[in-house]
Amino acid sequence: MGGLSSAAAQNGLLFGTAVCTSDVLAQPLTRAILRDCSIVTPEYEMKWDAVCPNPGFPDYSAADELVSFALANALAVHGHTLWWHESVPPALRTEPEKRFREAAMDHLQATVTRYAGRLHSWDVVNEPLEPADGRADSLRETPFLSAFGPGYIETAFHQASLLDPAAILVLNEMGLEYASPAAEDKRRQMLALLEREKSRGTPIACLGIQSHLTALEQPRNHPELRTFLREVRAMGLTVMITELDVSDHLCPRDRRRRDAIVADTYRAYLDLVLEETEVLAVSTWRLSDDRTWLNGFRPRPDGAPQRPLLYDRAIRRKPAWHEVEHALSKERQPGSDEAPP
Ligand code: XIL
C-alpha cells in the first residue's frame, strides 16, 4: 500500500507533518515520515527563539539539518514561523520598540534569505488575531503590533516576497475550525483582515488553518466552516491545513473507542475541507502519539497519554491513518455551486 503522500497526490496535494531533529535519527519514525510525507514542517527549529536564543548570535544549525534532510529525501519544506508572539526571544520581549523593530526585521530578512529558493512555503505571520484583545480590527496585541503598527503584516509579507519570490506565503491562524460563536467571530474577523490586506496589496497567497481539533467537540457537519472556506476560495486564496491533530481529552479511556472517535473526526473534517476549497497541503502536527504537544497543552483528566495522531507510540498505523488515507485519496470536485447543507 502506498503512503499518505501518494494518496494525497491523487488529488494534487501534499501530505506532511511537523518534524524535529531527533525524528531524523529515530529509525522507525523516519521510515514512516519518508513513506507518508511529501512535505515537512520544523516543529521548533526555525522559530525565532530557537534560532536566536541569544539575540545577535543566530544558530541555524538545527534548521539547516532539517532542511538538508528534507531536500536530500525530496521532501518539500514548510517554513514555520517568521513572526509569532509566542516565539520572540526572551531577551527581546522587554526591549524598546525601535530595538525590537530592528531585531525582528533582521531576523526575518536573514532567515528568508538563508533558505530562499529552497522552501515550498512560509508561515510568515502566525496567529495574528485575538478578538478578546478588544481592537476594532481584532488584531492580537503583540510586540510586532506595538513596534510596527497594524501594517506589520503587510511589512512582513512584502519583505518575505522580495527575498524569496518562489515561496508560497501563508498567513497561519488557530481557532478558525470550531463550532462556537467565538470561532464564527474569528472567521468573520479573518475574512475582514484578508480583505484589508488584499486591498493594500499584501502578498498573502494562502491561508494556513492550524486545525488543532477536539474529538467529540468538532462537529461532523459544519455549515459555517463550509461557508468560510468558500469565501476564502472566492478571494482567490488557497488553503493549507498546517497543524492537524485531534485531541482525545474528552473521549473515554478505552483505546479502541478513543481511536475510533479520533479517526472519525479526522475523516469528517478532511472530507469537509477538501470538498470546499483548494488545499495545497495537509500536515499533521507530528505523526506519532509518542511526542504530541497535546500531553502538555491538553492533558487528559485521567492522566492517560493522548492518542491524537496517525501512528501509536510504537509507530503502528492507527484507524486514523486509514481514515486520513481514505479522505486524501477520495475522488472529489471542489465545492459545487449549491448552497452549503
Ligand atoms: C508548539 C510545539 O508543538 C510545542 O512543543 C511547543 O512547546 C509550543 O509550540 N501553534 C503553532 C505551533 O503554531 O508552533 C505550536 O507548536 C502549536 C500551536
Image (spheres, helix red, strand yellow):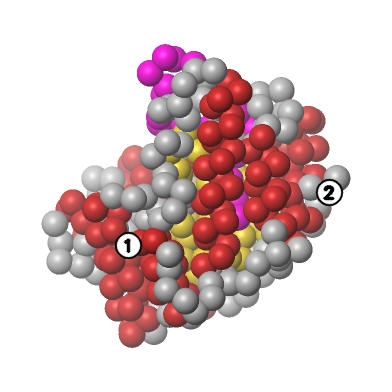
Q: Position of residue 217 (x, y in %)?
A: 39, 39
Q: Is residue 153 above or below residue 128?
A: below
Q: Is residue 152 above or below residue 310?
A: below
Could you tell me which secondary element the residue under label 2 belongs to?
Answer: loop
Q: Position of residue 174 (x, y in %)?
A: 39, 51
Residue occupying image coordinates x 59% and y 32%: 260
Instruction: Say whether residue 304 is visible.
Output: yes
Specify the segment rendered in magenta: 282-304
Residue occupying image coordinates x 76% and y 63%: 10
**Residue, disc 1:** 187
Amino acid under disc 2: Gly
**Residue, disc 2:** 2
Q: Is mark 2 within 8 Å of ligand 1?
A: no
Tell me the crowding category of disc 1: few under 14, some 14 to 19, or many 20 or more residues within 10 angstroms, Cα based: many
Q: Is residue 176 above or below residue 237?
A: above
Instruction: Please state which of residues 31 and 59 is positioned toward the viewer in this rendering.
Output: 31
Q: Is residue 283 magenta?
A: yes
Could you tell me which secondary element the residue under label 1 belongs to?
Answer: helix
Q: Is residue 162 magenta?
A: no
Res 196 label: none
Q: Is residue 318 left or right of residue 153?
A: right
Quarter that holds the C terminus: bottom left
Instruction: Give the alpha-carbon distance from disc 1 to disc 2, as whole Å.
Output: 36 Å
